[in-house]
Image: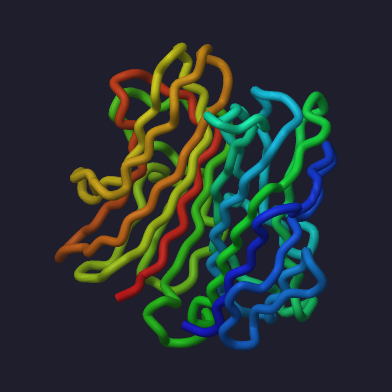
Amino acid sequence: MGSSANFGCSAGCGSIPVNGAPAMLSVIVQNGTSIRLQGMTNILLDASKAYLVEYNADFTTASSDHIIATELRLNGKLIPGSQSFSFPTTIPFGQNTPTANATGGAIFNTPSSPNPSILQLIGFSPVEASGSNFSGVNVRVTEIDNFASAGVTRNNAAIFSYGYENVGPVSPVPFLAAKVTNGSGITFSASNRTVIELAPNATYFASYSFIESPLMANLSVLVQLTLNGIPLDQSLSVAPSLADGVSRSGGAGSAVFNTGPGSNKLQLMNMNVQEIKFVSANINIIQIG
């Protein structure tokens, strides 16, 4: 791998208006030169490279039960698959301010122009939640091997899905398209929307996030990766139950795993015995060995 960096903020990380605003950051760790911070909101990235970005953000709101949205933007445009929603804000025990958090990420290629590209983490507040703020932010950026190089991590992909999809009990979540596919070790076809094909006898890192509407009150939603139909136990994510069946919740998970000989099929599964409406689902995959 090439450059890597960790940017963060632990307090006073910027207000969040309805029309969105970037999180304020400072440098925690910086290795190499292709990733750097400009001012307090712009992460500069070199042209024609592949990057993995993961983020988590904490929020405060003036009152409870508000959801904050986040997304990554590259040169002012949304990076598909990077959006996330917080759970409704609640007041933790021993505190007096409603809080929540969100987690997301994406794999993407920077264009040849402009050089450098500008990456920002943007937060959006609902109209009724004035007084919302970033209270803590952590953004991790890694340059994956240049997608023209021969390194194993050049095999990477970002696959996403939007739109309301009802997914049956213990059934795979369908995806729409692969926004990024570098190398040959990861294959996705829109003709088989629930399956991601992986190379044999290799090691992968996969991270995913999802937003769902449970269609039933007080139902926790379980989502997990499976490889050739076998659950990857370390990847299980549980979205907390909601008081109604129409509000949105979500979660995220990840796993490092080895593939075996022959065909290897990765799927993101609704592990509930009930049908779940998925609003979005995103998965980022890197071959690491």
User: Residue lying farthest front?
Assistant: 94
- How far across and how far down the image is residue 51, in percent? 56, 71
Q: Does 207 appear above or below 175?
A: below
Residue 141 pos. (x, y %) = 57, 69
Who's the residue at 62% across and 45% down the image? 58
| Residue in the picture at 42% in, 87% down | 150
Residue 154 in percent (x, y) is at 45, 77
Left/right placement of residue 224 relative to residue 283 reads left
Residue extending farthest to the left is 261
Q: Along the line of sight, which residue is nearer the eye, 126 or 107?
A: 126
Position of residue 210 in the picture relative to residue 119 (left or right): left
Q: Position of residue 163 (x, y in %)?
A: 58, 33
Q: Report which quarter residue 274 is drawn in.
A: top left
Q: Is residue 48 above or below residue 270?
A: below
Tell me the residue at 57%/52% (across/down).
56
Q: How is the image coloured?
A: rainbow
Which quadrant would the C terminus be assigned to in this image? bottom left
Left or right position of 282 against 118? left
The reply, left or right, for residue 117 in relation to residue 17 is left
Which residue is at a point 69% across and 76% down the rendered structure image?
A: 45
Q: Please count the marks in the image.
A: 0
